[in-house]
Amino acid sequence: MTDTQPAVALVTGASRGVGRGIAVALADAGMRVFASGRTIDGTALPAEIVRVPCDHTDDEAVARLFTRVDAECGRLDVLVNSVWGGYERMVEDGRFTWAAPFWDQPRWRWDAMITTGVRSAFVASQLAARTMVAARRGLIVNISHWAAQKRIGNTIYGIAKAATDKLTRDTAIELGPHGVTVVSLYPGLVRTEAVLAAGVFDLSNSESPEFSGRAVAALAADPELLKLTGSTLVAAALAQRYGFTDTDGRSPRPLTLDDV
């Protein structure tokens, strides 16, 4: 952002994983960061990050979150939509149901991916847009995945990510004339708590959770950011574009549709 005040960022779903890493990286970049999530109070975060417990399926709680950000800062420059419930209870009664065919999928998983994921991004984007449109600036980043473009393990997962990318494209059209940018961001294989605990992944080309946050910070600092609105962006490709590295100094290779 171009003025002299620190940018204000809100990262939803920041209790763990990619969301937590993005919140940390944005704080490292000098932003004032609000981090929300159901269990955010128990999350290891730098002291300067403002933790706000919030169930993003509760519209009133979400409205209170945005009211607090406005009351304390009077602005919102960056919204990162990272709320996601689709990786919970992947194993039920000893059976790995996450990869079952759609007709055998438990119906609660639709709500976990579509309501907790996509609808939460829509509601947060609505509330952020009202502030950003008035200010004629802002960046909304929707965390998405290649499953939007290719079947990867679960039909509902693909529907949710395709809907996320469609949310990006259509809101970008409506917000562009007001100076607000909207993008989808695809992380690679991220060394989240769940991935490390699984112990089955090849981590040779993996990314830290903070790497995606560095991508968001680089986007926010781009004076020609609006030219990217509506785009689907890959975190590792942004590292090549803007010249940043991961926390360990490495440069992960950008994945393509053929890789996933």
Image (cartoon, rainbow, N blue to C red):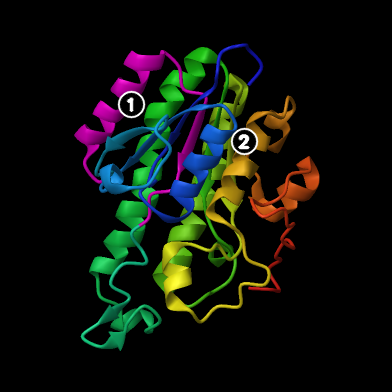
Residue drawn at (29%, 80%) of the image: 91
Which element is circle 2 on?
helix
Report, in whole angstroms, how far the alpha carbon at label 2 lies from the one at label 1: 21 Å
Q: Is residue 224 left or right of residue 203?
A: right
Q: Kindly identify the residue that appears in the image at 63 percent across and 31 percent down.
A: 220
Vertical arrangement, residue 253 with respect to residue 201, above or below: above
- Give the magenta part as a residue range: 57-84
Mark nearer the viewer, 2 or 1: 2
Q: Position of residue 222 (x, y in %)?
A: 72, 29
Q: What quarter of the picture does the C terminus occupy?
A: bottom right
Q: Which residue is mark 1?
A: 66
Residue 69 among those drawn in magenta:
yes
What label sits on residue 217 in the rendered view?
Answer: 2
Task: Give amino acid for label 1.
Answer: Phe
Does 130 sit above or below residue 124? Answer: above
* Comes first in the chain, label 2 or label 1: 1
Which of the image's four quarters has the N terminus?
top right
Examine the rendered structure and indicate whether residue 163 appears above or below residue 89. above
Q: Nearer the viewer, residue 81 or 125?
A: 81
Dot 2 surroundings within 10 Å: few (below 14), some, or many (20 or more)? many
Where's residue 213, x and y in %? 57, 44
> What residue sits 39% from the left and 53% below the top?
16
